[in-house]
């Protein structure tokens, strides 16, 4: 049972979604336009970016359960809106847990409040699942670093004030994950990049509109040495892994939200659509689909909240957070597909919202660690402890 505070939070986010997001989502998705700045500003004012950060660090001092609820409700309206928070969450946690005092003072309040927006540049064209195989190089040059290399799939890179870049500080590729560091690379937010320091090209995608993903080219991108997270080299991989518990809880919650949004639409349609002289919700085949969808969503929600509560009590939860993300990714694809099925032919038409949920749902098995990798990580923990 949720506390009164968490229930009230859910109600207030739902109100925001109904008023501010649902009227826009289909139009912006269809036209592949960005989530408007004004909407992000409202999310900043509501404190959505800083849910788990304490007020003295610019946040609102709530917990991971609150983060899960807010992420779920935002994504129930549109996955992309629930995902605007993700990068600030990761970078904020990295600085909070590993940053120098100066980095915490300078960057954390803005990131926790959402006034500074960040993007994550970890993936490379030849290194996705194999994070330790990245080639982007950061070379020390006096009191600065020069970063060069290619990144890909950097979501929100255009609009971000800071790119959190994973780069190799030890030139020996055999060092793999032991030679990587994380840098805070400042840039001017807006539609344009500043090549050759940072060049960016959008990647056309089948969903997840409202934000764009970019390939990036960095050429001697000069960064002050004190923008190396934690101030010491070759710790980046471990720092990144430590942020994954929170990130996976948030991703699982986003999937629960997308699935719930798809079920909302399927329920409404099933009650309205008549065939053979009665609403299709009267047919057992449809009723059982709805029952299975609701059951799967609730099971995933509870697993996600369980991981969130573990995190909030300071208990190690990488296993549970990973299970929640894995289970949620499979679940949301099934639920969105069945919700489209309930819409029949209209489900395949762009006139109905359900196709947006179906396209977005497919992403969960791919991003934030593929389901294949997630299974490997879970199996490793089970077998090796
Ligand atoms: C819309 C979108 C947004 C994204 N946003 C960001 C972002 O903001 N920042 C960022 O850094 N990245 C981002 N990513 C990248 C994402 O994290 C990667 O796509 C993901 O990690 C997989 O890497 P890959 O695409 O290179 O696939 P690969 O690693 O090449 O995998 C291809 C296939 O092989 C499988 N595979 C690989 N290795 C193994 C193994 N050891 N065992 C079994 N199977 C394996 C995978 O599971 C997958 O099915 C985004 C991706 C997408 C699609």
Image: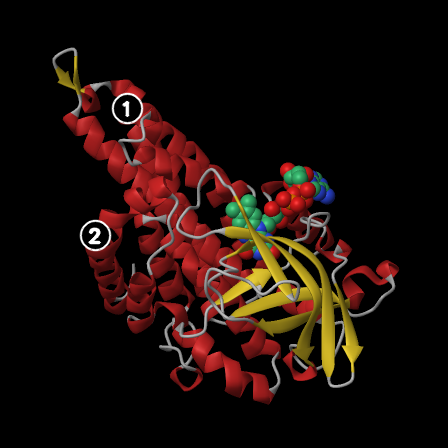
Work out how far the residue at label 1 is from the one at label 2, CA to CA, in angstroms.
Answer: 23 Å
Work out which quarter of the rendered image holds the N terminus and state it: bottom left
Which numbered circle lies on residue 253?
Answer: none
Residue ID at (53%, 63%): 119
Residue name at image x 50 percent, y 67 percent: 118
Mark 2 vs ligand 1: CB below 8 Å: no
Say if residue 53 shows up in the picture: no
Q: Is residue 20 above or below residue 274?
A: below
Q: Quadrant of the C terminus?
A: bottom right
The disc placed on residue 346 is 1
**From where the camera sits, is residue 93 visible?**
yes
Q: Residue 101 at what x, y percent from top left?
A: 58, 88
Tell me where residue 341 appears, x and y as whole percent.
34, 24
In the picture shown, does residue 264 fall above or below 284?
below
Neighbor class of circle 1 (other Cα within 10 Å; few <14, some 14-19, many 20+) is some
Foreground: 178 or 326? 178
Residue marked by disc 2: 18
């Amino acid at each position: 049972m949720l506390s009164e505070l968490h229930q009230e939070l859910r109600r207030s986010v739902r109100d925001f979604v109904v008023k501010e997001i649902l009227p826009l989502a289909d139009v912006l998705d269809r036209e592949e336009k960005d989530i408007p700045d004004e909407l992000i500003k409202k999310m900043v004012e509501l404190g959505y970016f800083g849910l788990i950060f304490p007020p003295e660090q610019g946040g609102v001092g709530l917990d991971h359960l609150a983060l899960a609820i807010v992420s779920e409700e935002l994504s129930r309206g549109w996955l992309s809106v629930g995902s605007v928070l993700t990068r600030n969450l990761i970078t904020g946690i990295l600085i909070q847990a590993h940053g120098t005092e100066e980095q915490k003072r300078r960057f954390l309040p803005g990131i926790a409040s959402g006034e500074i927006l960040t993007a994550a540049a970890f993936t490379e064209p030849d290194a996705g699942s194999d994070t330790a195989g990245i080639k982007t190089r950061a070379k020390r040059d006096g009191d600065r670093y020069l970063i060069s290399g290619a990144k890909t799939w950097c979501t929100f890179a255009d609009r971000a004030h800071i790119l959190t870049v994973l780069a190799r500080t030890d030139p020996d590729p055999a060092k793999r994950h032991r030679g990587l560091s994380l840098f805070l690379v400042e840039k001017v937010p807006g539609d344009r990049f500043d090549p050759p320091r940072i060049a960016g090209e959008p990647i056309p995608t089948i969903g997840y509109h409202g934000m764009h993903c970019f390939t990036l080219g960095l050429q001697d991108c000069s960064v002050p040495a004190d923008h190396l997270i934690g101030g010491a080299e070759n710790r980046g991989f471990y720092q990144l892994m430590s942020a994954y518990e929170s990130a996976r809880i948030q991703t699982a919650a986003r999937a629960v939200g997308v699935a719930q949004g798809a079920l909302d639409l399927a329920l409404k349609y099933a009650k309205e659509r008549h065939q053979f002289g009665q609403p299709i919700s009267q047919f057992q085949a449809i009723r059982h689909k709805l029952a299975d969808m609701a059951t799967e969503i609730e099971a995933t929600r509870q697993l996600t909240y369980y991981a969130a509560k573990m995190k909030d009590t300071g208990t190690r939860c990488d296993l549970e957070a990973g299970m929640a993300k894995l289970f949620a990714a499979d679940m949301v694809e099934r639920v969105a597909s069945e919700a489209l099925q309930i819409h029949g032919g209209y489900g395949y038409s762009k006139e109905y919202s359900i196709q947006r949920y179906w396209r977005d749902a497919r992403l969960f098995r791919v991003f934030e660690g593929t389901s294949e990798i997630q299974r490997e990580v879970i199996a490793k923990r089970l077998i090796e402890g």
